[in-house]
Image (spheres, grey):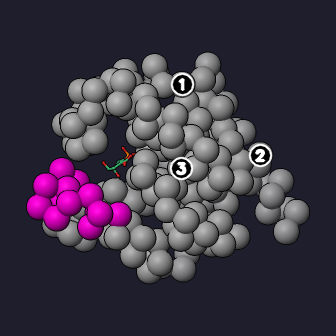
Amino acid sequence: MQKIYLVGFMGCGKSLIGRRLSYFLKMPYYDMDQEIVRRQGMSIPEIFERYGEAHFRKIETDFLREFRDEACIISTGGGVAMNAENRKIMRQTGLVFFLDAAFEDIYKRIRNDKNRPIVQSSTKEQLYELYQYRRPFYRQAGHIRVLTENRSVRQILDYIAFQVRRLKGGQ
Ligand code: S3P
């Protein structure tokens, strides 16, 4: 088990937790969306607009298939866990943590984000439906579910670090 993947809905804190976890566990950190933007030379909204969501999904799977063989932390995009092959790759190459946040908290963080095309094209009700639809897939993807509501970043980091030690120790 080499990598640590963070999955969950947009705005659940994957990037923040990933960055902090990287210091905490002394492992390199990669933000999948940022890596894709860098490689494609285009923002996520541009990729969606020019090539469509299906193409973006293919890029995500290619990223997971090809990413370097290195012990590292990867925060994934919110749609990554929807795809069975993505879930399989993540579970085979690492430990997967589902950051489970309450919808209202998530909504406050993402509602004005111009860089998230799905937020831009959806109403609050549609986002809530998507959130409900996706939760079982995040649960399927994750080895461990991390409840983030009413927990500080520090408490979340402690919990993940504890689980990493426990699961790696049990290998
Ligand atoms: C998406 C989430 C985004 C990004 C893209 C699509 C989704 O990542 O990959 O806008 O389908 O939920 P974040 O979860 O980091 O916002």
Identify the residue position indicated by label 1 in the image: 102
Q: Residues within 10 Å of mark 2 (few under 14, many from 20)?
A: few
The residue that appears at 46% across and 71% down in the rendered structure is 64
Principal secondary structure, stretch drawn in magenta: helix
Q: Looking at numbered disc 3 in the image, what kind of residue is underneath it?
A: Val
Q: Earlier in the sequence, mark 1 or mark 3?
A: 3
Task: Identify the disc placed on residue 7.
Answer: 3
Identify the residue position indicated by label 2 in the image: 162
Q: Residues under labels 1 and 2: Cα distance? A: 23 Å
Position in image of residue 127 (x %, y %): 37, 32
Instruction: Decide if ligand 1 comes within 8 Å of the CB at mark 2.
Output: no
Residue 13 visible within the image:
no
Q: In which quadrant is the N terminus drawn?
A: bottom right
The image quadrant of residue 120 is top left
Q: Earlier in the sequence, mark 2 or mark 3?
A: 3
* Secondary structure at numbered mark 2: helix
Q: Looking at numbered disc 1 in the image, what kind of residue is underneath it?
A: Ala
Q: Looking at numbered disc 2 in the image, what kind of residue is underneath it?
A: Phe
The range drawn in magenta is 43-57
